[in-house]
Amino acid sequence: MVSQILISIYNLLSSLINIYRLLLVVYFLMSWLPGAYQSGLGQLLARICEPYVSFFRRFVPPIGMFSLAGLVALLALSLIEMGLGPLFNIIYQLLYQLGIS
């Protein structure tokens, strides 16, 4: 029972991260299209993606005209997703040892 709940939560979080990653890629690709950020979709994606990306812009300086903050943001999201599996495994092992399974 508990393992099924943990698996469901893991799958939900993993899916949400993948959707957010896709939104970030679309947001970054929009920078190549003139005026794309001013469209309705661009403004929506900016509200969703910019708070996360702006965190990395504070720490990753641009190289010439190019900002690598987006790549670092995607990498961080991938690392977070890779850490979910071991984290949920640890939680499951703890619950199993406590007899809650």
Image (tube, grey):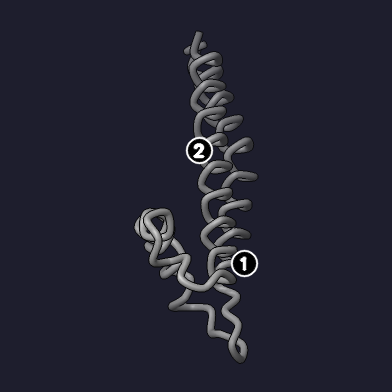
Q: Looking at the image, which is closer to me, 9 or 45?
A: 45
Q: Hey, which residue is sitting farthest bottom in the picture?
A: 64
Q: Seen in the image, is 56 located left or right of residue 70?
A: left
Q: Earlier in the sequence, mark 2 or mark 1?
A: 2
User: Residue at the spot x=42%, y=70% of the render?
Assistant: 54
Name which quarter of the figure residue 71 lies in.
Answer: bottom right
What is the number of the mark on residue 8?
none
Q: What residue type is labelled 1?
A: Leu
Name which quarter of the figure residue 14 lies in.
Answer: top right
| 82 over 77 or under it: above or below | above
| 19 over 57 or under it: above or below | above
Q: Where is residue 41 in the image (x, y as percent from the top left)?
A: 42, 54
Q: What residue type is labelled 2?
A: Leu
Q: Position of residue 51 (x, y in %)?
A: 37, 62
Q: Which residue position is annotated with label 2?
A: 16
Q: Position of residue 15 (x, y in %)?
A: 55, 34
Q: Looking at the image, which is closer to me, 15 or 76?
A: 15
| Circle 1 crowding by C-alpha within 10 Å: few under 14, some 14–19, many from 20 | some
Q: Looking at the image, which is closer to me, 87 or 8?
A: 8
| 89 over 45 or under it: above or below | above
Q: Which residue position is annotated with label 1?
A: 71
| Circle 2 crowding by C-alpha within 10 Å: few under 14, some 14–19, many from 20 | few
Disc 2 on helix, strand or loop? helix
